[in-house]
Image: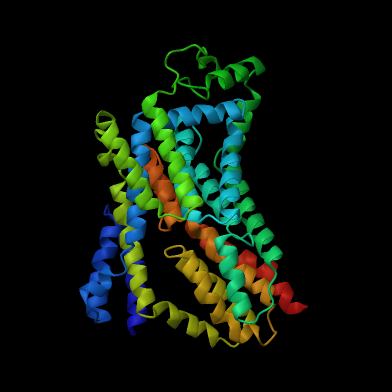
């Protein structure tokens, strides 16, 4: 049995064991990376650790630390209430508002993880307060960020179109963008309808108009979102109001957004810097915030990504791609490449996959047996819509910002959605985008 096969079998075992036994999958993956790296691939421990996602570690720690502070001092509550005012108490609109906001941010060039890191904490806080399914909210945040990223000036769009041009293939940026956005919107719609969106719409319809106005004016503060009669009076002292601490926290969040989205500063370190500054100014509000950092999520994602990085460094992914390239039937090869892109991207960098797999498809794309635009678009969509997986940066940010009581459930449900999309997306993209091009 080759080293590549052994490494892939071990990865499957990691998932099976962690599912059956109560053990953190990341811890198990770190041990597996050490054993497979040193015993199977014969590399040094330092090479194994070289795959640990230090950047993702800083992002998760920095963002969850900052928003733990913002929750402690009531800033997140204030933002959530202002959001309710903006939609006039119609909470069913909020998942779509988050989708559109993330799509707009990434469409103008922001990195997808940066957009999710900024929007997800507020979106998940809103979901917790107003009894919106956190999986649905997180799914729509991630898909919005993904769809927008394929605009001609978005990061995914620029990478994909750049690789296509460099490989002298036929490309169509408009088809890529609108196809990707359509796929993300479709996934969001399915998630909205199957994860409680219809109940939200019914709840909004059953809310009398005068009570909706009260909810909007009051920010729907401490009453139950499912019980309009519980809406507080606008003069209720329990409603969050801006004070010096919350105002300064809002300034810090604005600095985070501008620094990450406009000046392309590292969002993890920037979030840590803002959090440390707030802690120095208001030390009493920082008590217990370090404990609220999602350490379990950090370990889980860090371990899995370390193992997958080991497979990439040792050529296992390339080995799979080379095997596909030798498949005689172009249509079968096209489907397998889309499937590999989806599987690997669910655990690794979508940006890296887009840059690596499109050149892999060049040899048989140049034969003309498969349409270049269709396959490139199918591969791009298959490799990106799986970013809701809790093992990707975006999915991990959603899990890390979920309410503590819901975190395990959000992780399991997002893993189910991610694995389902990982199989369904390549099939649908292949049927809709690749097969018609080969028949024309």
Residue closer to the observer: 397 or 92: 397
- Which residue lies at the image location 50% right of the left edge and 75% below the top edge? 356
Image coordinates for residue 38, horizontal then vertical, percent: 22, 77
The percent coordinates of residue 261 (x first, y second) are 50, 51
Residue positioned 56% across, 49% down in the render: 105
| 287 with respect to 371 (left or right) | left
Instruction: Identify which residue is drawn at 40% across, 43% down.
Output: 401
**Residue 146 x, y percent position in the rendering:** 56, 56
User: In terms of depth relative to the viewer, which is nearer, 202 or 214?
Assistant: 214
| Quadrant in the picture for residue 4 | bottom left
Residue 76 visible? The answer is: yes
- Give above or below for 88 relative to 428: above
Quarter the N terminus occupies:
bottom left
Side of 103 relative to 74 (left or right): right
Asked if one can make out residue 381 in the rendered structure from this viewpoint, the answer is no
**Residue at the extreme right of the image, as rendered:** 440
User: Quadrant of residue 367 in the image?
Assistant: bottom right
> Which quadrant is the C terminus positioned in?
bottom right
For residue 374, above or below residue 327: above
């Amino acid at each position: 049995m080759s080293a590549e096969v052994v490494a892939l079998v071990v990865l499957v075992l990691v998932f099976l064991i962690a599912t059956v036994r109560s053990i953190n999958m990341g811890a198990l993956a770190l041990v597996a990376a050490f054993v497979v790296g040193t015993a199977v691939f014969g590399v040094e421990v330092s090479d194994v650790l070289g795959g640990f996602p230090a950047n993702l570690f800083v992002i998760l720690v920095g963002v969850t630390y900052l928003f733990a502070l913002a929750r402690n001092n009531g800033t997140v509550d204030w933002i959530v209430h202002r959001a309710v005012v903006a939609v006039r108490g119609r909470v069913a609109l909020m998942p779509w508002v988050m989708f559109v906001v993330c799509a707009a941010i990434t469409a103008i060039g922001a990195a997808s993880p940066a957009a999710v890191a900024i929007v997800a904490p507020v979106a998940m806080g809103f979901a917790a307060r107003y009894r919106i399914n956190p999986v649905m909210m997180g799914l729509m945040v991630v898909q919005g960020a993904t769809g927008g990223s394929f605009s001609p000036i978005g990061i995914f769009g620029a990478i994909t179109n750049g690789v296509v041009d460099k490989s002298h293939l036929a490309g169509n940026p408009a088809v890529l963008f609108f196809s990707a956005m359509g796929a993300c919107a479709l996934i969001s719609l399915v998630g909205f309808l199957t994860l409680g969106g219809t109940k939200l719409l019914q709840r909004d319809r059953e809310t009398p108009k005068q009570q909706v106005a009260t909810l909007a004016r009051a920010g729907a503060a401490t009453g139950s979102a499912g019980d309009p009669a519980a809406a507080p009076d606008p003069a209720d002292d329990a409603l969050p109001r801006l004070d010096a601490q919350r105002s300064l926290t809002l300034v810090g969040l604005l600095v985070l957004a501008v620094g990450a989205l406009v000046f392309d500063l590292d969002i993890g370190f920037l979030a840590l810097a803002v959090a440390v500054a707030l802690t120095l100014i208001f030390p009493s509000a920082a008590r217990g915030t370090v404990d609220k950092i999602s350490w379990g999520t950090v370990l889980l994602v860090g371990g899995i990504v370390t193992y997958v990085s080991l497979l990439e460094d040792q050529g296992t992914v390339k080995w799979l791609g080379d095997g596909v390239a030798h498949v005689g039937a172009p249509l079968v090869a096209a489907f397998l490449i889309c499937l590999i892109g989806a599987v690997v991207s669910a655990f690794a960098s979508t940006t890296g996959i887009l840059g690596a797999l499109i050149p892999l498809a060049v040899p048989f794309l140049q034969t003309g047996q498969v349409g270049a635009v269709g396959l490139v678009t199918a591969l791009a969509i298959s490799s990106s819509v799986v970013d809701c997986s809790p093992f990707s940066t975006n999915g991990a940010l959603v899990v890390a910002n979920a309410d503590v009581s819901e975190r395990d459930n959000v992780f399991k449900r997002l893993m189910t959605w991610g694995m389902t999309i990982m199989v369904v997306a390549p099939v649908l993209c292949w049927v809709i985008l690749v097969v018609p091009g080969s028949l024309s």
